[in-house]
Image (cartoon, rainbow, N blue to C red):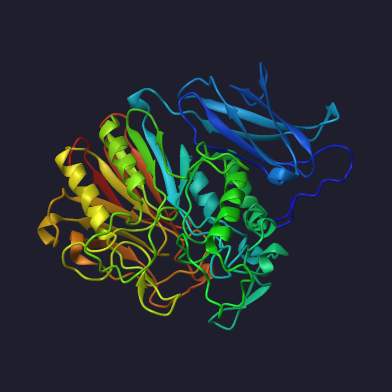
Amino acid sequence: TALGTAPAFARSGRPGAGWGVQAGDVTSHSGLVWVRSDRPARMIVETSATESFRHAHRRHGPLLGRDTDFTGTTRLRGLPPGEQIHYRVLLADPDDPRRTGEPVTGTFRTVPVRRRDGVRFVWSGDLAGQGWGINPDLGGYRIYDAMGALDPDFFLCSGDNIYADGPIAETAALPDGGTWRNITTEEKSKVAETLAEFRGNFRYNLLDENLRRFNAQVPSIVQWDDHEVRNNWYPGQVIADTDDRYTEKRVDVLAARARRAFAEYFPVSSLRPGAREGRVHRVLHQGPLLDVFVLDMRTYRNANSPGEQAVDPQGILGREQLEWLKRELARSRAVWKVIAADMPIGLVVPDTTEGAPHIEAIAQGDPGAPLGRELQIAELLRFVKHRRITGTVWLTADVHHTSAQHYQPSRAAFGDFEPFWEFVSGPLNAGAFPASELDGTFGPERVFVKAPTASNVSPAGGYQFFGEVDIDGGSAEMTVRLREQDGTVLFTKVLRPGRVGQ
């Protein structure tokens, strides 16, 4: 199918799966497989050890209908560990199971139980932001081809999978006088407010054939941040009357719709499409070498403010999620504990959407003792030190440039923690922005950065990034590489296993 066209299926009696397939939250013995139909259908998944699908094992999944926008997920159980799994999804007519559409195939590797197999994954975030959408002149989202070429075990998407608050027009002016062209859809012509518009935002990205091809090859671990709902949102927020783009001013209403669409369009083990319960934060065990702790820095946060309060029990994670994270970190037996954060720790991310200069992330610009949301991070870092938890590494996106920060207590106003690294990547396809200011509270030193000097540089101007983590099965060393959109390595850091601090 051509780039940007929803693969056309004649409206005969056979269901079509033109949006491709995805796998997600893969473990040693299970995985979730996702599909979207173009009409009511029964989802059927066949798995095999070979591409020929001889001796295929068949599983009947859910009935796909309007209540989930014709999307559905099937959990595959009882899979062999550390093996390549080939799968194909068939969509059957609910009234005549013999009438099935063209099968859509995908593959993923289950998590190994042997340490010597190693782990390799990629991460990034921030897709189709600032009005920069699928540009056929550039070949669409080509960064996914560069990530897929590394044949990673999985892709960690660190949030801003969509820009629900960022309409995409047919064209945008470039600084050199040129014109950027976008593939457009009706749902992307305005800010998302209705459930249908949020669903259309997720569907928009699946018009890109690079992304569909990547999804069929690499399973995902997905988290969310603000743009799945609205820039810099927090629970209980009410949009100012002066923002006439929105008729629905209650952010909690928008967030509930966005969360439902998010659960429908990604295979996430801790969420069920259409269900109110469930959560985005979760831990995914990736064998003896790695646990991935997926955080949700949106759902439980307090209101954005100058961040100067001396007591802040709710913080950015909420008390319950913080206690969950401490408990799971202490319980982990993996060599490496990747904390997948949707926002950085020591980079100052301001929020001016409500007029007064508030803080959107954690660092509030005062290099002194922890205040505001920094208090919760100080509590977590202190816990990691005193429980002698080894191998913690922070990965994030959000700020639309790439960098590596080393946090060192000897440089910090708050010193009761062990040194650690935080690596930033992204965007995937969005405007690039200058490097953020650093806050000295936890003693960060920016060891590497690549960022433009101008704001909102289009993807045509470069500055699109992803990161790679490669854990060696023999030495258990972790090699982190920050890469450009074509795969070029910009920075490499090798971390040694078994240490509390690095």
Task: Name the residue located 53 percent from the left edge and 63 percent from the top edge.
Answer: 251
Q: Nearer the viewer, residue 107 or 79?
A: 79
Q: Which residue is more in the foreground, 142 or 377?
A: 377
Q: Quadrant of residue 199?
A: bottom right
- Viewer can see residue 367: yes
Q: How many marks?
A: 0
Residue 221 on image: x %, y %: 48, 42
The residue most toward the right is: 12
The answer to whether residue 502 is visible is no
- Work out whether 75 lies above or below 355: above
Is 441 situated above or below 56? below
Residue at the (80%, 43%) spot, across then down: 39
Left/right of residue 159 with respect to residue 439 in the rendered view? right
Which residue is most to the top? 55
Q: Residue at x 54, y 70 (%)?
A: 130
Residue 96: image x %, image y %?
86, 28
- From the viewer's perspective, tell me whether residue 299 is left or right of residue 186: left
Placement of 317 over or under 389, stated as above or below:
below
Residue 446 drawn at (x, y percent): 25, 63
Furthest residue in direction left, as rendered = 410
Image-quadrant location for residue 165 = bottom right
- Percent coordinates x, y for residue 434 in the rendering: 38, 72
